[in-house]
Amino acid sequence: MISNIGIVLVVLLLVLLTYIRLAPTDPAKWHGISDRKGLGDHPSTGGFMAVRRVTASQDEVLSAVRDVALATDRTQLIAGSVEDGMMTFQTRSKLIGFPDYTTVRVEDDMLTIYGRLRFGRSDLGVNAERIREWLAVLGPLTVPL
């Protein structure tokens, strides 16, 4: 027989998981890159930033990033456009639906891709993995490290 405490814990867990999957997203909160970094990979708690020099125009690079991002499972554009010079995408995990946010910007000849989680402290490396996969596809448009 399940105790009352066990039932309460299961209900609380279900409520939490439902909130994670259905919580509204405020694009204004996630659409931006406040920290400027130099060329390279920059891991952080719950996130990852990659900065690369580009070999094509801003519009060409951002169009390619948009196409790669939207081809990624469970990913959608939530803010920005190629014309704006910056876009933010939301990617949800398959099982629980944890949202991660990835902002992409090209300034001058520098591409910045910044992925971070919304809930928790560790993304278990999924932002870095996703960004590296995108960069591999974008290869000819960026200068390797």
Image (cartoon, rainbow, N blue to C red):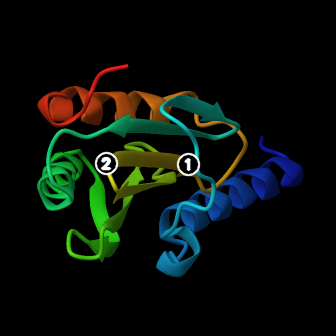
Residue at image x 18%, y 35%?
138
| Residue found at the far front of this picture | 108
Instruction: Residue 117: give x, y in percent of width and height.
Output: 58, 50
The N terminus, quarter of image = top right
Q: Secondary structure at mark 2?
A: loop
Say above or below: 144 vs 46: above
Instruction: Residue 53: give x, y in percent of width and height.
Output: 33, 37
Give the quadrant of residue 77: bottom left
Q: Which residue is mark 1?
A: 116
Foreground label between 1 and 2: 2
Q: Check whether the beta carbons of the residues at disc 1 and disc 2 lie within 8 A of each other.
A: no
Residue at image x 58%, y 43%?
37
* Crowding at mark 1 (Cα within 10 Å: few <14, some 14-19, many 20+): many
Q: Amino acid at mark 1?
A: Arg
Say above or below: 93 vs 141: below
Number of disc labels: 2
For marks 1 and 2, the one nearer the N-term is: 2
- Left/right of residue 122 with respect to residue 53 in the rendered view: right
Q: Which mark is residue 50?
A: none
Q: Amino acid at mark 2?
A: Asp
Q: Which residue is mark 2?
A: 109
Residue at image x 70%, y 60%?
11
Cα separation, mark 1 vs mark 2, equals 23 Å
| Residue found at the far top of this picture | 145
Residue at image x 15%, y 54%?
57
* Crowding at mark 2 (Cα within 10 Å: few <14, some 14-19, many 20+): few
Instruction: Residue 8: give x, y in percent of width and height.
Output: 80, 58
Say above or below: 35 vs 85: above
Q: Secondary structure at mark 1?
A: strand
Give the quadrant of residue 84: bottom left
